[in-house]
Amino acid sequence: MNLSEKDQLYHWHPYTQHKTTGLLPAIVKGEGALLWDETGKEYIDAIASWWVNPFGHCNRVIADAIYEQLTTLEHVLFGGFTNKPAVLLSEQLLQILPSNQKKIFFSDNGSTAVEVALKAALQYFYNKGEKRTKIIAFENAFHGDTFGAMASSGISFFTEAFQGSLIDVIRIPVPTLGNETRSKEALQNAIQSDACAAFIFEPLVQGAAGMVMYAPEILDDLLSICKENNVFTIADEVMTGFGKTGKTFACDYLVQQPDMMCLSKALTGGTIPMAITTFTQEIFNGFYDDDTNKALFHGHTFTANPTGCAAALASLKLLQSDEMQANIERIHQRHVRFQSKIKNHSKVKTTRILGVIFALEIQTENQESYYGTLRNKLYNFFIENGIIMRPVGNIIYILPPYVMTDNQLEKVYQVVENALEIV
Ligand SMILES: *Cc1c(COP(=O)(O)O)cnc(C)c1O
């Protein structure tokens, strides 16, 4: 048996209906934007392996930093102790995060980063003896798959089975072009009619919804409304963070600053699972007390893993290099050129770009479901053509590693164009 066959025997894959899924390619090697499977087939990773890998597979700089850390101090518990890479990483992050962010809480993945933010928001008010139990979130949001994160997520089939076991979330429309007023009014209504602790959102781009985008100005308005009403704001930058929108964080496009931020995915350059939730001093102070019970009793075994922190430090340095910033701009410009070429194609309903993110909606007669027939047809077409992409319903998006070469990018565009002929 080869790896793919053994995989079918042993594994249960994420978001996968195994009855209708065949053998999966077994990836054995990666370099830059390329991956190879066990049969030697080459793939271009056009979505940075689920948005985690900006600097390319097997990046030497990060690999060396990890090796160095593994042979110095691989791990030590963060309960009762601290470690050097964690301190250095937080020091650097606090310099580039919105200036009101003062405290760093480590965890393991995007969902846990969200979980920590939600728990902090709810407990902040509990500690003050104030009853605020509701969370506000966007329609079609995606914040992760653990219970709190799932409750905040609005993609219904992800969460249907668990209704009734979820925390209370009030959903408001996404303020895409033309929906700004509806969104604002819904937020005002939610705040007026219920005791809300926090508003969680994916700033400017809803990744899992299919790279749905909205403007910074309206997000600023929404944040102002929350501020005026002492409702905490949680920017879930798990997808948008670390350069993908063209700025380090999507929140860098805003005038307002969020009270909390969630980071993961590209944090360690796609190497070691790690996440961070950041807080204002005000939130931290809400737990700072002589009473032990007012502390945030949340933790994960691998919190602030030194090897993960070393990988994150190396990633930050790469991100801030002139070379990588030029790559981000280069890819953005290429996207803009491709957009002007493709946007009038009869099968194209709409296109959108922010930073290195490019999305294209295909004109369809029916509403396409998230994992529907069209999506599967497109997915398989891309795989056959050696391109890794995960369309969402009728939406194709590209979110390449910043190191993707112009030739590789052209090949991706070409296959996207060809895909329009098969739908
Ligand atoms: C992926 C994602 C998450 C969940 O992260 P996991 O590491 O998969 O748990 C949360 N929020 C956003 C915006 C994401 O894109």
Image (cartoon, helix red, strand yellow):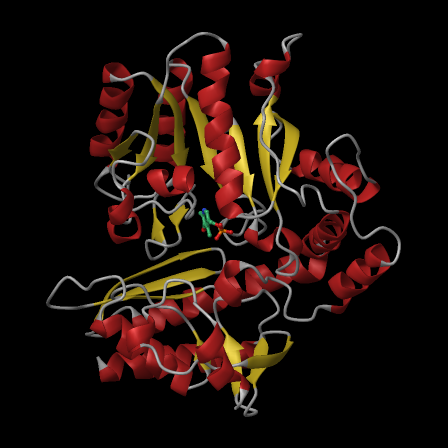
Query: Which residue is more in the foreground, 283 or 75?
Result: 75
Q: Which quadrant holds the C terminus?
A: bottom left
Q: Position of residue 334 (x, y in %)?
A: 48, 69
At x 39% / y 14%, what residue is drawn? Answer: 228
Which image quadrant is residue 165 in?
A: top left
Say whether residue 167 is left or right of residue 286.
left
Which image quadrant is residue 374 in?
A: bottom left
Q: Position of residue 118 (x, y in %)?
A: 46, 30
Q: How many marks?
A: 0
Would you say residue 253 is visible in this rendering?
no
- Up/down of 155 relative to 216, above or below: below
- Up/down of 242 relative to 6, above or below: above
Would you say residue 133 is visible in this rendering?
yes
Query: Which residue is more in the foreground, 12 or 340?
Result: 12
Q: Position of residue 421 (x, y in %)?
A: 24, 84
Say whether residue 409 is left or right of residue 183.
right
